[in-house]
Image: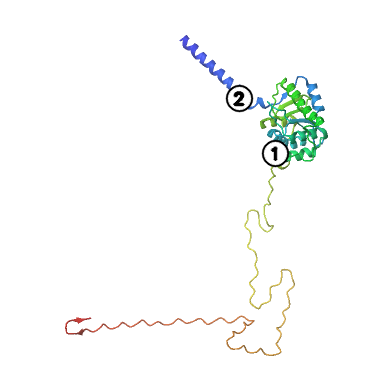
Amino acid sequence: MLRRFFIWSALAALVGLLLAGGGYWAYWNFHARFQPVTVTRKQAEIQRLLDEASWLSAGGGGEPLYIVGYRDSAATMRYEQEETEKLRAAGVDPRVIIFARSDREGLSQSTPAERATVAELWLSRDWTLYQRWTATPARGWTAAGIPAADNNLARSAVVNAGRDFVDRLSALLRENGVQTRYPLVIWRDRDGYLRACACSDKRSWAFIRDDLDAPDRVGSDVPPSPVALPDAVSPDVPPGGALPYPQLPAPAQQGAAPAPAPGAAPAQSQPAPIPAYPPAAAPSGVPPAPSQTAPAPAARPQPKTVTPPQPKAAPQPKKQDDSTFY
């Protein structure tokens, strides 16, 4: 009996541990890992890096929010397109920091046009140029009219400065438990604490909106409110009643004067003018012109009496020499 009790107790403890482990994994996998991280280490250095970087903004003031990413990052471009207007509606100033990725194992991860554009944006901070660049497909962008960064000592140094900025920022964020995934979004919450998010997954974006009191929908994303319809389409028809049949004018007879418009004074009848000469007779074979007055109705034809045919007499037999035929 005691042995059976210990066996069932061990099974119950094992089931409890499995349920607790599964619940914790579900909480972490579906909720906790998408939450932003509060930066507790080297906040001043991270803030200095953000202030010294050449960020791009459409203006508008407000609390800054930094979006760090590269041009070919689909998540970065999508976050900027879908979330920046919502953040601006909450009084936040989204600031974009774009960079060209470093080579990996001798393989270039950026194009000459991308490096030239990044160098120009870091030097000029031209928001209009950035909008043109992001509105053009990456493969179709040629950076026409922009000085090349390759074989240019000054512009190559600007591109490398952007890479050094990202490397140092990523190292500082890893110390605070933030993984290096793009876009990296950094802001300060309502209490002034520095917050960071590796927002490559769309499920992380809602936490940023909640932290900054940003709306979930703005502009064209808001569904139109239903339009209230009147209770009756006509003042003469009670609500829920049927519409009356329209009052149509009687068909005008041939040669009669048209009916007067509603509300107009009735027209006075005038006698028809008498012709000075009698009308000439119509030639034979030509049908006469229709008269102005309506023709008299034709007489109704009388039914004809049909006489039934008289039955024919039966043929009389004829006698021939051999036989008789009928």
Label 1: how many residues lie within 10 Å, few (<14), some (14-19) or many (20+)?
Answer: few
Looking at the picture, tell me which residue is in the foreground, 141 or 15: 141
Query: Could you say whether the residue bearing mark 1 is in a helix, strand or loop?
Result: helix
The image quarter containing residue 261 is: bottom right
Is 174 placed left or right of 305 in the picture? right
Q: Is residue 87 visible?
A: yes
Q: CA distance from mark 2 to mark 1?
A: 40 Å
Residue 26 disc label: 2
The amino acid at mark 2 is Ala
Total marks placed: 2
Of all residues shown, which one is farthest toward the front?
Answer: 151
Label 2: how many residues lie within 10 Å, few (<14), some (14-19) or many (20+)?
Answer: few
Looking at the picture, tell me which residue is in the foreground, 324 or 294: 324
The amino acid at mark 1 is Arg
Who comes first in sequence, dot 2 or dot 1? 2
The image quarter containing residue 99 is: top right
Image quarter where the C terminus lies is bottom left
Looking at the image, which residue is at 50% across and 11% down? 6
Image coordinates for residue 237, horizontal then vertical, percent: 66, 57
Image coordinates for residue 192, horizontal then vertical, percent: 79, 25
> Which is more foreground, mark 2 or mark 1?
1
**Up-down relation of residue 309 to residue 202 (above or below):** below
The image quarter containing residue 110 is: top right
**Up-down relation of residue 192 to residue 233 (above or below):** above
Of all residues shown, which one is farthest toward the left?
Answer: 322
Image coordinates for residue 86, horizontal then vertical, percent: 74, 36
Q: Is residue 54 visible?
A: no
Image quarter where the N terminus lies is top left
- Give the labeled residue for mark 1: 139
Looking at the picture, tell me which residue is in the foreground, 233 or 111: 111
Is 43 placed left or right of 204 in the picture? right
Query: Could you say whether the residue bearing mark 2 is in a helix, strand or loop?
Result: helix
